[in-house]
Image (spheres, rainbow, N blue to C red):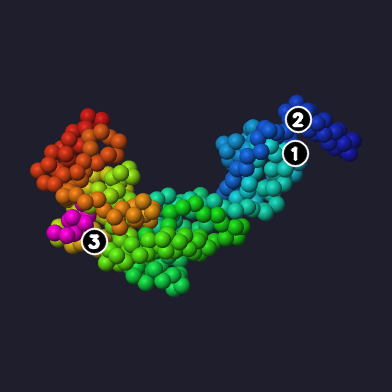
Amino acid sequence: MVKRLVIIVILILLILGSIAYVFLGLNNPKDTQDHSEILIEIPMGSTTGDIGVILESNGVIKNANMFKLYSRLNGFDNTYVAGAYTLSPSMTTEDICKIISSGETTSLKFTVPEGYTIYDIADAMSDYSQLDGDNFLRLVKEGDYSEYEFLKGAVSGEHRLEGYLFPDTYLLSPGGNEEDLIKSMLDRFQVEYDAIKSDVEKKKMSLNQILTVASIIEKETMHLEDKPLVSSVIYNRLDIGMKLQMDTTIIYAMRENKVDLTYDDMEYDSPYNTYIVDGLPIGPICCPGRDSIDAAINPAKTDYYYFVLTDQGDGTIAYSHSHEEFLKDKEAYYAAQDEDD
């Protein structure tokens, strides 16, 4: 009797499975004509349901619940391996399941935007099972990168690679780690540095100083046309021994994304705080892109000593020669902010 009941249950499941295939199309591709390749990252600890949601949200499959059902009916549930996989909407559900359960990951794409700090890079690694942000920061501080001559003038300690990890999109092979990524970024910087080395030498400034200026420009500007102008303000202030007083340097020192600084913040004790130190901070405050580096090498020729965001709310900047003009521009900016609030 029990044996007959088991057989009946099995037959029912088989019938239900067949019905599901016919009527639900569990194994059908989302789009047989769409052969685009999509890199999908499956984080550690993802359940079958989690993976289905990731696949659906990235346009690889039609429905996360159907993927979950297919996985259970076909023995793929709990077999999936974390990592990066290249998938396509033209693939059948079976093909997708086999790829993700194989553990044969594809290249991991990791993007470092212009203006990212080493801490931003470490934080971004939390989205990738292949990379560990804490280990990245440890390697930034302790790793051996003596083969890179351009690092000889960099600061020591945990900030020593700040500014030298060139922002770009990098591909890591399966098994690639944080050190591989760091060296890829330094190799990329080497290419950029080779192109500007003679210009840097003409400036009679160290590479670290140029990158420090570039990093401030990167953080202080949103638009390309503002970069050489902000660069001119920095150099004009340096030329007359005027403190730079750049808010972005305090924000970097404090590692807080504050919009409005207090007077106490301006007293924050750090060699990066340009409200209290003379001249440039000891090193870059982010990883600048090529446009900002070029602006640091070739500033515009102006008589500006001040700048502030305009009241347009679009990231454009107002420049001024005198403190009085600056205060007017600043007042207009804050008045516009109050209206928006």
The stretch of residues the image draws in magenta is: 233-240
Q: Nearer the viewer, mark 3 or mark 2?
A: 3
Q: Residue at point 27% right, 39% down?
A: 316
Task: Please name the amino acid that badge 2 sits on.
Answer: Ala
Q: Residue at x 12, y 42 (%)?
A: 325
In x, y percent, where is residue 152? Answer: 37, 72
Quadrant including the N terminus: top right
Which residue is identified by label 2?
Answer: 20
Mark 3 to mark 2 CA distance (whole Å): 68 Å
In the rendered image, the vertical position of residue 30 relative to residue 169, given as above or below: above
19 lies left or right of 107: right
Q: How crowded is mark 2: few (under 14 residues within 10 Å), some or many (20 or more)?
A: some
Q: Dot 3: within a 10 Å radius of its alpha carbon, few (fewer than 14), some, or many (20 or more) residues?
A: many
- Assign a secondary structure to mark 2: helix
Which residue is at 25% across, 48% downward? 229
Is residue 192 visible in the rendered image? The answer is yes
Mark 1 burial class by Cα count in 10 Å: few <14, some 14-19, many 20+: some
Q: What residue type is labelled 1?
A: Leu
Residue at numbered disc 3 = 280
| Res. 73 mark | 1
The answer to whether mark 1 and mark 2 are in CB contact below 8 A is yes
Kind of residue sitting beneath label 3: Leu
Task: Count up the numbered dots.
Answer: 3
Residue plotted at (34% across, 56% down): 293
Asked if residue 268 lies left or right of residue 79, the reply is: left
